[in-house]
């Protein structure tokens, strides 16, 4: 049954440091909505009756409905639903727009001349409305908007497995292993093939349509795989190769594992690929002035010995953290925003059934620092673009639920 402001009988407010939050209080006494706040962050109740909620509706229809919809359900891209939102959050945000803290000129102009009493009543009105419906049918399982970075990287590397192995460990002489590589180094190598800086017709064609985001996903996938030596033969004298490798240790580490993420690791690499690469630097077909100066004096035997030495070293996994899955991100977000985005904290916004484009917009604003929040900043600055899309899709598909704030008798 659809609720109406008149059917509620009254609303209970909770005041927090000068800001009012409102929850339902059936048959609440009709007391004035404008109550002075207690000092500090302690919450205390105040009340608004149906008439005052009606006044909030009239203000909302004049100042807010053009963007946020007649019943607080927005039909405008990037503009949030307000129906059923937590009232303290609404009030605090309206105050932030008035003060310029939110930096939105349109919203600042819309609320600039509203007094505190009007803001409280508008918040009460919107919190009394039925929330928007989720974007997926009730009970339907909403799939993530996109695969997460690791899954996407795995999917993209399916086309690479024939040459580089399923997990980036080469079984084909002449084909490089891709495990044990820092993502920064591997992305730089793939971009060099894309641009033609590294000449290799097959690689240039294979990477032609791969986006920068795809490259990052591929590099992350390989970086997270268990490292192992290439399963290919290596001829040459390892002891002699170790002695020759002394001049390489400054960049590539004494065992082929360096400390600079931009420098490729050589440990466990296919020996034939290493030898061919050294020859390419020597003859100038692969451009790098530093490498050319170092390999110009190498003879064929030394090249083979160096390749054998590095091929038999144990590669190490780069210091790369596995990103959280969408389920893990949701678990973190729910700690503040409530189960499935249905906040029970009057100061925290509900996310359930919110517009997906608005959720994406807000998360990107937190990621870039355009929107400030000491709580959201450390959460959002590690989100990828895919994480943002998946989180927005998840919460937009959840059923929104109204919240009842209950007043208890004094003990």
Image (tube, grey):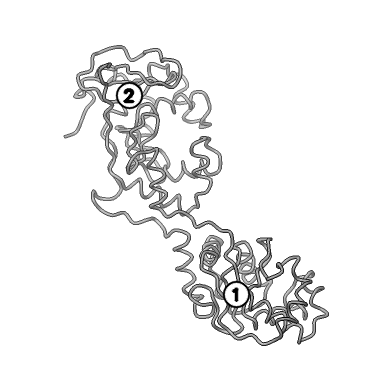
- Secondary structure of residue under mark 2: strand
Residue at screen point 40% across, 38% down: 336
Query: Which of the two discs, 2 and 1, labels the residue nearer the N terminus?
Result: 2
Q: Is residue 4 left or right of residue 166?
A: left
Label 2: which residue?
A: 22
Question: Would you place residue 278 above or below residue 99 in this image?
Answer: below
- Relative to the observer, which residue lies in front, 286 or 230? 230
- Measuring from the top left, give residue 276's x and y in whole percent: 69, 82
Question: Would you place residue 218 above or below residue 42 in this image?
Answer: below
- Relative to the observer, which residue lies in front, 181 or 131? 181
* Quadrant of the snapshot with the C terminus: top left
- Measuring from the top left, give residue 253's x and y in whole percent: 71, 67
* Quadrant of the snapshot with the N terminus: top left
Mark 1: few/some/many CA within 10 Å (<14, 14-19, 20+):
some
Residue at screen point 56% across, 40% down: 369
Q: Which of pointers 2 and 1 indicates the residue nearer the eye?
A: 2
Label 1: which residue?
A: 204
Question: Would you place residue 296 above or below residue 399 in this image?
Answer: below
Q: Is residue 152 left or right of residue 283?
A: left
- Secondary structure of residue under mark 1: helix
Most distant residue in the front direction: 239
* Real-space Cα separation, disc 2 to disc 1, in angstroms: 60 Å
Q: Quadrant of residue 302?
A: bottom right
Q: Is residue 333 left or right of residue 366?
A: left
């Amino acid at each position: 049954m659809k609720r109406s402001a008149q059917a509620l009988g009254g609303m209970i407010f909770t005041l927090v440091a000068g800001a009012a939050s409102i929850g339902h209080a059936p048959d609440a006494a009709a007391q004035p909505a404008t109550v002075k706040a207690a000092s500090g962050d302690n919450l205390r109740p105040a009340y608004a009756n149906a008439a005052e909620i009606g006044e909030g509706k009239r203000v909302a229809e004049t100042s807010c409905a053009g963007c946020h919809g007649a019943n607080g359900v927005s039909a405008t891209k990037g503009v949030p639903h307000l129906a059923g939102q937590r009232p303290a959050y609404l009030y605090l945000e309206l105050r932030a727009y008035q003060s310029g803290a939110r930096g939105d000129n349109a919203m600042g102009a819309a609320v600039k001349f509203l007094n505190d009493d009007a803001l409280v009543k508008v918040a009460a009105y919107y919190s009394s409305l039925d929330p928007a419906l989720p974007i997926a049918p009730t009970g339907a399982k909403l799939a993530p908007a996109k695969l997460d970075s690791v899954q996407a990287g795995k999917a993209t590397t399916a086309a690479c497995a024939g040459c580089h192995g399923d997990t980036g460990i080469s079984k084909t002489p002449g084909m490089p292993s891709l495990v044990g590589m820092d993502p920064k180094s591997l992305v730089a190598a793939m971009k060099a093939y894309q641009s033609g800086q590294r000449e290799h017709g097959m690689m240039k064609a294979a990477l032609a349509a791969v986006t920068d985001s795809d490259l990052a996903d591929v590099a992350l996938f390989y970086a997270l795989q268990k490292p192992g030596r290439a399963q290919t033969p290596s001829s040459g004298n390892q002891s002699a190769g170790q002695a020759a490798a002394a001049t390489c240790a400054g960049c590539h580490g004494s065992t082929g594992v360096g400390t600079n993420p931009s420098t490729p690791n050589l440990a466990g690499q296919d020996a034939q690929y290493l030898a061919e690469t050294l020859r390419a630097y020597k003859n100038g077909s692969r451009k790098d002035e530093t490498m050319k100066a170092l390999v110009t004096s190498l003879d064929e035997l030394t090249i083979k010995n160096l390749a054998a030495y590095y091929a038999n070293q144990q590669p190490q996994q780069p210091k790369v953290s596995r990103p959280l899955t969408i389920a893990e991100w949701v678990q973190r977000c729910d700690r503040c925003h409530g189960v499935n985005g249905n906040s029970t904290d009057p100061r925290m916004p509900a996310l359930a059934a919110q517009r997906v484009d608005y959720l994406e917009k807000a998360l990107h604003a937190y990621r870039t620092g355009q929107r400030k929040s000491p709580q959201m900043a450390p959460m959002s600055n590690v989100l990828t673009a895919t994480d943002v899309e998946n989180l927005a899709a998840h919460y937009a598909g959840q059923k929104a639920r109204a919240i009842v704030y209950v007043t208890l008798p004094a003990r």
